[in-house]
Amino acid sequence: MNMNDAQELYEKAANLAASGRHEEAVACYETVLKINPHNSHIWFNLALSIGNLGRHQDVVKCCESALKIHPTSSPLWILKGLGFLSMEQFHEAMACFQESEKLGDTSAGGHMARCRLAQAEWYFRLGSRYQQEGNNTEANACYEKGLALDPSKTVIWVNKGAALLALKCASEAVACFERAIKLDPRDSGAWNNKGIALMSLGKREDGFACLSEAIRLRGGKQEQ
């Protein structure tokens, strides 16, 4: 196969990818790379199609091969970061996005924000698993890490408050439920848990008021 044939096959691969036929596109790109392994654009497009097939580790490997050829390509750093992000390897993803930002890519900030939010969600899921197992100390530690990344996530404040309440830290729990209510005044779970925490502190009147608000928000239904 000569370079003209390789160019035709590259164009065929691009058309296959555009029509969503990524497995066939990958096969074409890989054949072209045997002829022209030093073309970072082919590696980039191969990584895109591989990513569409859910092979995120291979996306990272393709980007690493391309970056050896073109280390200052911001799109390659972004794509590599997205590969890491899809595998929930947040520190590695953030390092790639930061490298892209150094190269002047204005989209890097958005990717870094997305990475922080995804990591916060990961800490929330991990904390929830600990909480279900009754390990409220570890759950609370996970929630703190999640909130450091995304303090606007109401459900983490509610779960953190519940973990603290289980750890007999009622005053700290009340503060968490208040943060949740400030973010979402219609969160009946936050009102309900705040009421329980206040009752445990002997503040029965305030606690009853919160419990009543929770019932009102649920349309008159008791907490199950």
Image: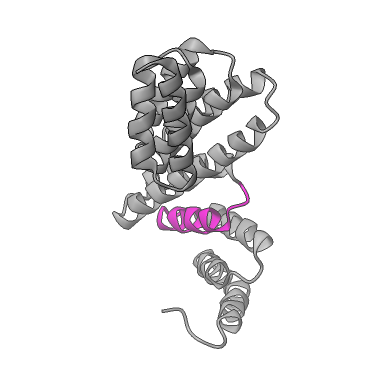
- Across and down, in percent, residue 96 comes to 53, 24
In terms of depth relative to the viewer, which is nearer, 203 or 127?
127
Magenta includes 161? yes
Quarter containing the C terminus = bottom left
Q: Is residue 219 left or right of residue 103?
A: left
Magenta includes 144? no
In terms of depth relative to the viewer, which is nearer, 155 or 26?
26
- Across and down, in percent, residue 175 comes to 60, 55
* Residue at image location 70% in from the left, 21% down from the top: 104
* Residue at image location 36% in from the left, 31% down from the top: 28
Quarter holding residue 46: top left
Residue 54 seen: no
Residue 89 seen: yes
The region drawn magenta spans 151-168
- Across and down, in percent, residue 111 comes to 59, 36
Residue closest to the far bottom: 220
